[in-house]
Image (cartoon, helix red, strand yellow):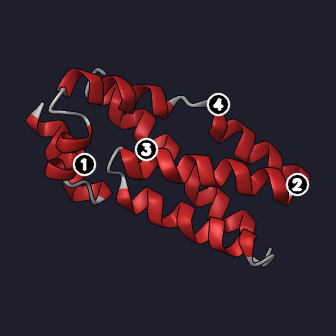
Amino acid sequence: MEELYLELERDWGWKKDVVAFKMDGDHEFFRACLKAFSHDFTFERLLKACKKKDYDDLLIQAHTLKGVSLNLGLSMMGEDLGKLVEKLKEHDHENIDELVSRISQWQSRLEFLCAKMDL
């Protein structure tokens, strides 16, 4: 389990103390939440909204993912989602595809991490 936390701290900007407080120290619950988030359908909805250029739906999906990622302590992912949310709120659609691609890469990395850690 420590290997998971070390990797999260190093590669995701994860803060153990903050997340442990939010999760009331329940490591199994945290691991279950992390695994569920890695497969969350909201990522798929984000990609579909981007493809359709439905910026209102894209904002909703990005905002949802930002909240969950930050609650799980995935601050680097949350920062990228925050950038996407801000651009969408400002109706700045330049380079949106690039940001959505980065979010998709974060999800892929999270799925890989969960599989590697046997979550």
Residue beneath the point at 53% across and 28% down = 39
Name the N-terminal-most of marks 1 and 4: 1
Q: Nearer the viewer, residue 71 or 95?
A: 71
Residue at x 34%, y 36% (from the top left corner):
113
Residue on which disc 2 sits = 54
Residue 95 visible to an observer of this rendering: no
Work out which quarter of the rendered image holds the C terminus and state it. Answer: top left
The one of 71 and 102 positioned closer to us in this rendering: 71
Q: Are marks 1 and 3 in contact (CB under 8 Å)?
A: no
Q: Which residue is mark 3?
A: 109
Q: Earlier in the sequence, mark 2 or mark 3?
A: 2
Disc 2 to disc 3, C-alpha distance: 26 Å
Q: Nearer the viewer, mark 2 or mark 3?
A: 2
Q: Secondary structure at mark 3?
A: helix
- Residue 41, labelled with which disc? 4
Task: Nearest to the eye among marks 4 and 3: give it.
Answer: 4
Residue 84 vs residue 34: left or right? Answer: right
* x and y percentages locating residue 36 in the rendered image: 46, 26
Q: Regarding mark 2 in the picture, which secondary structure is present there?
A: loop
Q: From this view, report whether residue 103 is shown above or below residue 20.
A: below
